[in-house]
Amino acid sequence: MGRIVAAVILLAATAVYAQEERQFGDWTAYCAADGLCRAVAGDGPVLMLERHADQTYWELSLDLAPATAGYDSPFDISVDGSGQTFEHAEVGPYGSPTRYYFLSAKAQAILDAMILGQTVDFDYTGEEAIEASARFSLAGLSAALLWIDETQRRIGSERVTGEPPYGLLPAGLEADPNLAVPADLVETHRVDAECGQFEELANGRDIVVARLGEDSTIAMLPCYAGAYNFSAKVYVIEGQTFALQHFAEYSDYTSWSSTDELVNAWYDPDTGEIGTFNKGRGIADCGSSGLWRWTGDYFRLEQYSYKGDCDGSGDPGDFPVVYTAKPLPED
């Protein structure tokens, strides 16, 4: 999904905010010092509408903490009895495995109805295939959003929603929630023309965020999904800075070259190793595989295997070794 681009420079982007909180009916409105404002209802589950100071759209989410919904469970949302069903790619957890964001034009239709409605209901499949639901009063919502408009100096702005949450990755099964990923990295990867959007990829939640070194983190973010090959790009993060990694690859046609995409990759946090298995075709009788190890400064190629002839012989992935690195002195 493309980001909504503002046509004018927003005053809110440079404003300095004081932390404030107000109550409007059944909704609480809150603005943080960085300008992020949210309207909240409920105490478990919690329904939220929030907007960053320098973004033009609202983010609609439902936090089920400490529970989660069933994997790929659809959500039925109805306002005063009329609503929408959100399927895969239209709803999913971001940042936290318990917080579900609602996307697409359906989210816009729900927000429009909520502003004029009285109650909103959420129905979904919870953990262990148990049906679950949540109802929220909408009394005070319009007033809460208006107060946020005033605080962010956005009176008269459109109530638009449906975009993925700013700076948040889909909650991946291998993503350590205690390790921070800079919002700039998320947005940089989102606009990468070589990659598909997380919401559109079959492997869109196959995200790895893990400890790499004492002061560094590795993030492996999905880029491409095919019939039997799935690629990712690898970033090394130190504080708020990050660097896209490049890796050696070999073929009979190009000889040795460099790539910033790894195919069917995995990462072992205990050894600091990255491995790949690029299938030349579905039965994997040809293709390549590689093994790299983190040295503290870069990923060092340890071994590379390659087979160019798809001849139907040999075990899947059993490719001849074309390179083996010499041991480092400390090894």
Image (tube, helix red, strand yellow):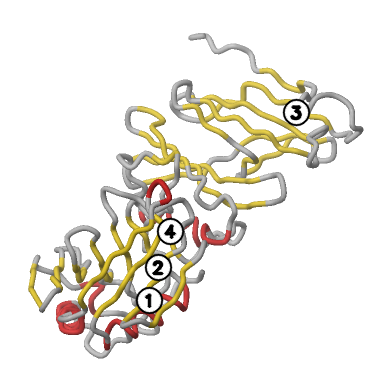
- In this rendering, position of residue 327 left or right of residue 305: left
Q: CA distance from mark 1 to mark 4?
A: 15 Å
Q: CA distance from mark 1 to mark 2?
A: 9 Å
Under mark 2, the amino acid is: Phe
Q: Where 310 sits versus 197, above or below?
A: above
Tag 4 residue? 92
Which secondary structure, mark 4? strand
Tag 2 residue? 102
Under mark 1, the amino acid is: Thr
Q: Where 82 sits versus 203, above or below?
A: below
Of label 1 and label 4, which has the lower sequence position? Answer: 4
Q: Which mark is residue 324?
A: none
Under mark 4, the amino acid is: Gly
- Residue at image coords 57%, 61%: 200
Of label 4 and label 3, which has the lower sequence position? Answer: 4
Residue 300, position as x, y percentages in the image = 57, 26
Contact between labelled residues 4 and 1, with CB atoms less than 8 Å apart = no
Tag 3 residue? 317
- Residue at image coords 20%, 84%: 142
Which secondary structure, mark 2? strand
Q: CA distance from mark 3 to mark 2?
A: 40 Å
Q: CA distance from mark 2 to mark 4?
A: 7 Å
